[in-house]
Amino acid sequence: MKEASLMATSQKKFSKSKCGVHGTWVIAEPLWGDSGKGKFSEFFGQQADMVVRYAGGDNAGHTVALKGKEFKLHLIPGGIFNPKALCVLATSVVINPFALVKEIQQLQENGIKISQKNFLISEDAHLILPWHQLRDGLGEKARGGEKIGTTGKGIGPAYGDRTMREGLRVRDLLDTKFSEKFKREAEWQMKLIRLMGGDESSLDVTKTLKDLKSVTQFLKPMIANTFEVIQKYQQKGKKIIGEGAQGALLDIDLGGYPFVTSSHPGVTGFSIATGIQHKEVNKVLGVVKAYSTRVGSGPMPTELQDKICEHLRTVGHEFGATTGRPRRCGWLDAVAVRYGAKVAGIDSLILTKIDILDQLKEVKICVGYKVGSKKYSSIYTAHPEWMAKAKPMYTTLPGWKQDTSKVRKFSDLPKNAQKYIQKIEAVIGLPIEVVSVGPEHQQTLLK
Ligand code: IMP
């Protein structure tokens, strides 16, 4: 695969810098996702021996741009473009086997080699099957005006089954008694669907079983005890990247419940899925956009509904990579980033899409919330009822009115852009190590 081996010069320089991958790194997000983890999983994945996706399912949409070509990944880690890296779907990922096979085949059609030599799937991961998507939709319908705004991929029902110790796992596909297990499971799922007022006749269970058998033949060589493989890589001191999905404000425990996903997008999720503990992780990089976006329901204190929002959405192509939904857009919420960074265990930041602000006369950063008469510069909850009352307090800085997408050195960024970045660091209290001015490798600036 040409793209795979064409590592841009910036990447080579990067590996010599202080940002050269060593030990175990995790790439996570402090807010609501969609900030560009895909670019950095691929970018750092070029230096890694292993890239592990540790949470979520095909609700994620990671965009990778290589030499003008765009790839949309939903399950497969960005490390797949490095032919020397072993990519892993770890235990806590929920896997729609049909979506996975489709994604593998699409990448293969584009010349990317994928086999058990560079891609493994945890035998303990739970499966997403068509009834989970049906239940996801029924759940949303039942919530009426209180919809979560899920991606409809069956994430919540699949994780729900896992917590109830129901559902089927990847290892079941290999079981000689799979057909019996599947039929038993199907009966249980049909009962649930009927209880939810759904119409189970839209599911063709016999066909699903037949299709699963051919999917299993395809995936079988890649199914493994990934815990063992990951542990052995770690013991040998190999370079490991953990690729997160979604963002910390969508964390099932510390996010804005119930407007959350069903997993742990931060370093906690990585530890649960891999057995590599937080204290053994050398760096947690948080990817955050130079402005904020959210898809789905739930409060977003800096959300705008004006020309600035339109500008951010249009120039920034802010449409969901998985569902195509327009994203809600607003100024960078540094208060929420600080909270999310704590939840995700983030040590330093990558600031992406600063080029989208290039044309603006002035730029704003949310540095505090006003709730009633009280002012907050730090928050200790993402509880939606409380957050919905938060009025953002902004600091306004002059814009830079210059094209940054062709800048190749941090020090060459317009002075006002540098001041904006410094202000973000000061408010959040974390260093920004990398600034991204576009999707390609060479649009990656070291600070
Ligand atoms: P679910 O994960 O499909 O159950 O959706 C729950 C919430 O998480 C919804 O608000 C989704 O829009 C949001 N969500 C899920 N995956 C992503 C993602 O990859 N990026 C951004 N938001 C996401």
Image (tube, helix red, strand yellow):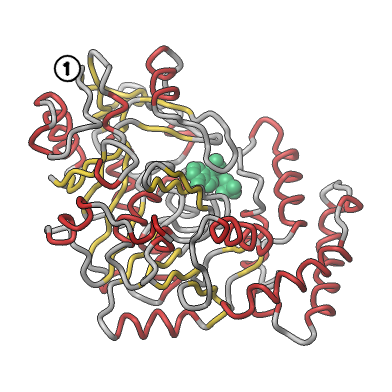
Say if 407 sits above or below 306 in the image. Answer: below
Q: Could you tell me if residue 90 is visible in this image?
A: yes
State the residue lying farthest toward the right.
201
Disc 1 marks a residue whose amino acid type is Pro
Left or right, 425 with reference to 135: left
Q: Nearer the viewer, residue 428 or 1?
A: 1
Q: Name the residue located 40 percent from the left edge and 28 percent from the top edge.
A: 316
> Residue at point 41% right, 12% down?
307
Above or below residue 384? Residue 203 is: below
In the picture of the structure, the residue carrying the numbered disc 1 is: 398
How many numbered marks, from 0 up?
1
Q: Disc 1 beta carbon < 8 A from ligand 1?
A: no
Res. 259 visible in picture: no
User: 80 or 233, which lies in front?
Assistant: 80
Ligand 1 quadrant? top right
| The image quarter in which residue 292 lies | top left
Residue 263: % across, % down: 51, 58
Residue at 34%, 81% in the rendered image: 233
Residue 354 location, quadrant: top left
Q: Give x and y (percent) for residue 197.
A: 86, 46
Residue 300 lies left or right of residue 233; in this view the side is right
Q: Is residue 11 placed above or below 47 in the rendered structure?
A: above
* Location of residue 145 in the rendering, given as x and y in whole percent from the top left corner: 67, 30
Q: In which quarter of the image is the N terminus?
A: bottom left
Q: Nearer the viewer, residue 372 or 297?
A: 297
Q: Quadrant of the C terminus?
A: top left
Is residue 43 found left or right of 64 in the rendered image? left
For the residue carrying disc 1, how many other residues have a C-alpha within 10 Å: few (<14), some (14-19), or many (20+)? some
Q: Nearer the viewer, residue 73 or 288?
A: 73
